Image (cartoon, grey):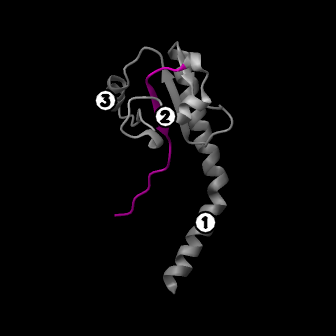
Amino acid sequence: MQELLDFGKAIELAYRSIDDYNEKLLNLREYYISSIEKKIDDIYINGSRKDRLPGNANISFKGVDGNTLLLKLDQYGICTSTGSACNSGSTEPSHVLLAIRNANRIYKWFTKSNFWRREYKR
């Protein structure tokens, strides 16, 4: 029974701080996207800039091989991916990306970055 009470308290605490947490994620995402836009030409932000999860950025880079980009980003400690969960194992854009992008702007490679808080107790 105590575990249920503890779990309930944890949910209550998380719920109280969710707005602040989402605001921090939104600011981090906007800083990330703005920094890329200032430094790299020929990119495309996939999806709405406003109507998306606060910790998500999905960016297409014209003429850039996704696997090479992943390796380079990894060297700088940046974790990202080039695939989508709904299109795992395929090199083609997912049906979701095809639906949200203008057909003239479909770039083969994109990166998907998600931001979150990492807290582990060991």
Pick whichever, 74 or 48, lies toward us: 48
Report the residue marked by disc 2.
94
Q: Amino acid at mark 3?
A: Gln
Report the residue marked by disc 3.
75
Mark with earlier residue (2, 1): 1
State whether the magenta stretch is mostly helix, strand or loop: loop
Specify the quadrant of the image occupied by residue 29: top right
Give the magenta part as a residue range: 106-122
Eye-nearest disc, 2 or 3:
2
Q: Are marks 2 and 1 in contact (CB under 8 Å)?
A: no
Outermost residue toward the bottom in this view: 1
At horizontal 60% and vertical 26% (from top left) the residue drawn is 101
Q: Amino acid at mark 2?
A: Ser
* x and y, in percent, of residue 71 in the image: 31, 28
* x and y, in percent, of residue 63 in the image: 42, 14
* x and y, in percent, of residue 34 in the image: 58, 24
- Disc 1 crowd rating (10 Å Cα; few below 14, some 14-19, many 20+) is few
Residue 93 is labelled as none
Specify the quadrant of the image occupied by residue 100: top right
Residue 13 is labelled as 1
**Cα distance in 3D space between marks 2 and 3:** 27 Å
Q: Is residue 91 left or right of residue 57?
A: left
